[in-house]
Image: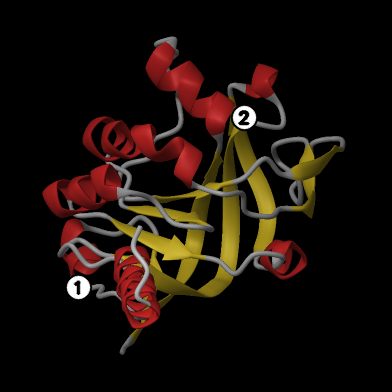
Amino acid sequence: MTHHVLHMPCDEAAVRGLRVGDTVTLEDWLFGIRDATQIAMFDKGRNVRLDLRGHAVVHTAPNVRRVPPSPEAPSGYAPLCIGTTTSMRMERFTEPLLRDHGVRLIIGKGGLGPASAEAFKRYGGAYLAVVGGAAALETTWITEITDVDLDDLNPESLWKFRIKGFGPLLVAMDSHGGSLYATVGKRVADRRAAALAALGASE
């Protein structure tokens, strides 16, 4: 297992160098995105002005405070608590994020499914897992909110964060077909089958 420090945006080669079980710390930039953001982008055809190519997105609807724009808060927002939400319900958006917007990394909790695993292989992407309940810690890794798009969807806007030392995050799905969730799922299924067989029981 290897630890990687990635300055965002990064290229395909850097992401294809990640393997399940590695850890990653991100520097410089991160985008916040959630259900309503992606429904607007992909189901309703709304354009976004922020460039996601080569970047990481985190599944979040942050708790923020509106403040007067300043050098410390150029977007007019200050971060209060920026946590991570469960990713699986956004499974169908992985491929268009990578294919159409050039996203390289998705950060969330709970993992994504087979369609996302295929998209990561095809386009060169990876899923980085955050431990649930770490919102207070994650917020300390965000130094400011520099921009916001689709702000009528607040808090499920498209957020641009400046970050410092965002991590370590666990590589839970990589661009080579590796998936921590698939591996654990198979192990659980095998143990269940063995337990049932030992009891002489069937499904």
Which image quadrant: the C terminus?
A: bottom left
Residue in front for this viewpoint, 107 or 29: 107
Across and down, in percent, residue 21 comes to 34, 80
Residue 164 as seen in the image, left or right of residue 78: left
First of labels 2, 1 by sequence position? 1
Across and down, in percent, residue 172 comes to 37, 68
Please give the name of the residue rendered at 34% of the width and 70% of the height, measured from the top-left corner: 180
Residue in front for this viewpoint, 90 or 30: 90
Please give the name of the residue rendered at 30% of the width and 64% of the height, measured from the top-left corner: 182
The outermost residue toward the bottom is 1
Task: Give the answer, above or below, for where 123 lies relative to 149.
Answer: below
Please give the name of the residue rendered at 61% of the width and 37% of the height, measured from the top-left corner: 147
Graded by Cα atoms within 10 Å as few (under 14), some (14 to 19) or many (20 or more), the crowding at tag 1 reads some
Task: Give the answer, above or below, for where 203 lies relative to 164.
Answer: above
Graded by Cα atoms within 10 Å as few (under 14), some (14 to 19) or many (20 or more), the crowding at tag 2 reads many
Which image quadrant is residue 47 in? top left
Which image quadrant: the N terminus?
A: bottom left
Across and down, in percent, residue 202 comes to 34, 63
Helix, strand or loop at disc 2?
loop
Give the numbered dot on residue 101: none
Residue 187 as seen in the image, left or right of residue 16: right
Residue 181 as seen in the image, left or right of residue 72: left
Tags 2 and 1 touching, CB below 8 Å: no
Which amino acid, by three-letter code, is at mark 2? Ser
Which amino acid, by three-letter code, is at mark 1? Gly
Q: Which residue is tagged 1? A: 17
Across and down, in percent, residue 201 comes to 37, 69
Residue 79 as seen in the image, left or right of residue 102: right
Q: Which residue is tagged 2? A: 157
